[in-house]
Amino acid sequence: MSANNFLNDTIVAMATAQGLSAIAVIRLSGEDAIAITQKVFQGKNLIEQPSHTVHFGTLRDGTKLIDEVLVTIFKAPNSFTRENSTEISCHGSPVIVKEIIKVLLKHGARLAEPGEFTKRAFLHGRFDLAQAEAVADLINAETDNARQAALNQMRGGFSKEINNLREELIHFASLIELELDFGEEDVEFAERDDLKKLIKRIQTFLLSLIQSFDQGNVIKNGVPTVIAGKPNAGKSTLLNTLLNEEKAIVSDIPGTTRDVIEDEMVLGGINFRFIDTAGIRETQDVIEAMGVERTRDRMKKASLIIYLFDLTQTTLEEILQEEEGLKALGIPYIKVGNKVDKADDALVNILQNHDFLFISAANKTNIGELKERILSTFGIQTVKTGDVMVTNLRHYQNLLQTNAALDRVLESMHNGVTGDFLAMDIRQSLHYLGEITGTISTDDLLDNIFSKFCIGK
């Protein structure tokens, strides 16, 4: 849908979660939002009321009473979308919500697409694209760190830094473009040394943002953490102990866990998704073999592996051999020796020099130390108000592309290339920076971003 057609309609959607609730909120936005609401509302004349006021009345389909409601009015441009908007607070029965939306559609509204309210806010200049994406991140935040990171981005700190850098680069780009108009006179309006200093200053800032993505991605998306090891190492017991609930079946029979079992918990402001997996061994059982294969696949995709060794059943040679396989994955891992209360003291003494953490999952021994080791592996700091951090993969990729384009500018200046090639590389870097905040955007880019939003936002 093109932007022009997109803005002509009045859209409607449920803004609160689906299902039974005390209250549900239905949103409308568009030029006719207040007029359409007035057609089904019995109470004060909403069109005559001032913005940011709330009115009690009933909603009707002809003579049929649907519900008693509160209607909040927002008149353009003083609304989230900068369009006329209404929010209808009704009782939270799905039947009532369905009836209200149906009658609003009958009077000229259409169902909103995913993210369409926020997309309209962006197109009307309410905020830039990076801030719009932060709205979705804020809604989906599962930890306080994720909430604060999204809030910082939504309030524009990240965008402000990007736009300031882009403006400085535009200044130099315009001078180089001016040089091209005087090509035959061999003049330089843009001091090359000043341009080099600016680019290196921009790259220093870009690199700090690029490096922040590792932590930002963890804060936003959490840490998929695989608990792996041989059968009967105590993986399911450890999962149950970490979560403090009987999530996984525990049995002395090897191969009980045949598929992955997942659950989440927050440690130190980070969401960890713990994944209990089938024990790794050679087996003739077809179902168990499929589970083992899924374990290997999950280990390759994990951000952290907790590899559990049964200290009562494992030799030093086997441990060293299994660690070689862990190293080959190139993924952070923690070696955990389980059943320390039953282990041979000689083996424990040897393994103390091999960076082992010793626990008893069944007796909850040293579980606190394991949680501390898990957190220290990532070293995440608490996100504070004003911290600038990259949490979005799209922004990260654009920053990498910008930095590469600036590298080409420096290389071009070093090699003494002509101004037209120099200008082309600067334009590329400006393009990638502009895509972050939406200064440069396409319908495809916008559709891709906003399609990931929930309907009603």
Image (tube, rainbow, N blue to C red):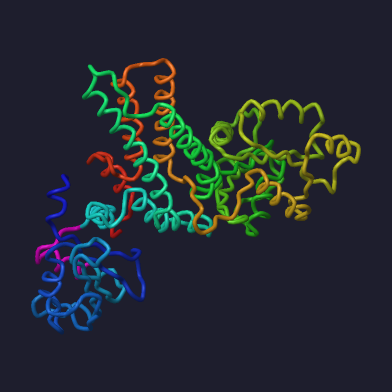
* Magenta-colored segment: predominant secondary structure: helix
Q: Is residue 159 above or below residue 411?
A: below
Side of 371 where 60 appears, left or right: left
* Residue 12 highlighted magenta (yes or no): no
Residue range in magenta is: 98-111
Could you say which is closer to the camera, residue 149 or residue 314?
149
Image-quadrant location for residue 20: bottom left
The structure residue drawn at horizontal position 12% and vertical position 65%, both measured from the top left corner, is 32
Looking at the rendering, which quadrant does residue 84 occupy? bottom left
Quarter that holds the C terminus? bottom left
Q: Position of residue 148 (x, y in %)?
A: 49, 58
Decide: is 46 above or below 292.
below
Q: Residue at x 71, y 29 (%)?
A: 322
Question: Was residue 99 drawn as part of the magenta stretch in this picture?
Answer: yes
* Percent coordinates x, y for residue 87 in the rendering: 25, 71
Above-or-below relation of 213 to 110 = above
The quadrant of the image that shows the N terminus is top left
Residue 385 horizontal/vertical position (percent): 51, 59
Residue closer to the observer: 285 or 371: 371
